[in-house]
Amino acid sequence: MNKDYSIGEAAAATVLLGAQQLIYKFVYVLPPTRAAALAPVDVGISSKATTYVQAAILKYNTNFSGVGSFSTASPLKVHAVACAGGKGCERVQLYVLAPVLANGWTLLGETTKVVTVSAQRIAAVATTKDSVSLTARGSAGERVQMAFLSPAKAVVLVSCSVFETGFVRMTAAGDCQQV
């Protein structure tokens, strides 16, 4: 998608994650000069079998905001930004559209990245009846902070250090295990 909605330029990037081929979308709107609503079909999500949530990415190293369901009935709402004489025209709105896993949990991703979920960082995602875990790769000693959305719609932040193996298994319960 690279579409002009007369709100500015809107584009969506796609990330496929793990053996499940989870589809994540990252939507960028620059500059949004009028309010609009983007439905799943507008960003290239056509599967009605998968439930999605949306969250705004405010800025580097912050929590997500405006977390809620994403569907035709609950579209992504782009907010207007005043843009006159070059002032305010640089304001970008960033969103992650993340699939809800079979157990009701959602991986929102890294809080320190614009593209919060990537196959380069996340080697695997697994679910149990009550939780979700992921295996992250990185440099030994590197600190990784991930956000999960619980079935009760609470954002859970988990921070772990990567082990000497170059991996760490993180659970939504806050456990950090060597892989």
Image (cartoon, rainbow, N blue to C red):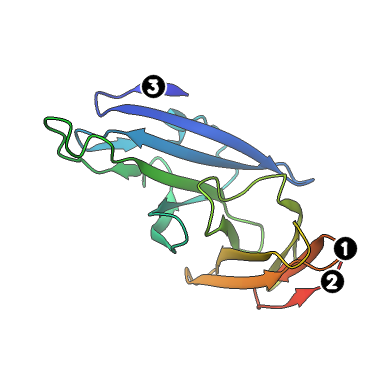
Q: Earlier in the sequence, mark 3 or mark 1?
A: 3
**SS at circle 3:** strand
Q: Is residue 117 left or right of residue 91?
A: right
Above or below for 139 versus 171: above
Label 2: few (<14), some or many (≥20) within 10 Å?
A: some
- The residues tagged by marks 3 and 1 sit, at their Cα atoms, a distance apart of 43 Å
Q: Which residue is mark 3?
A: 3
Q: Which residue is mark 2?
A: 178
Image location (x, y in percent) of residue 167: 81, 61
**Residue type pointed to by label 1:** Thr
Q: Which mark is residue 165?
A: 1
Q: Which residue is drawn at the image coordinates 72% and 45% (left, top)? A: 120
First in sequence: mark 1 vs mark 2: 1
Q: Position of residue 136 (x, y in %)?
A: 74, 58
Disc 3, disc 2: CB below 8 Å?
Answer: no
Q: CA distance from mark 1 to mark 2?
A: 8 Å
Nearer the camera: disc 1 or disc 2: 1
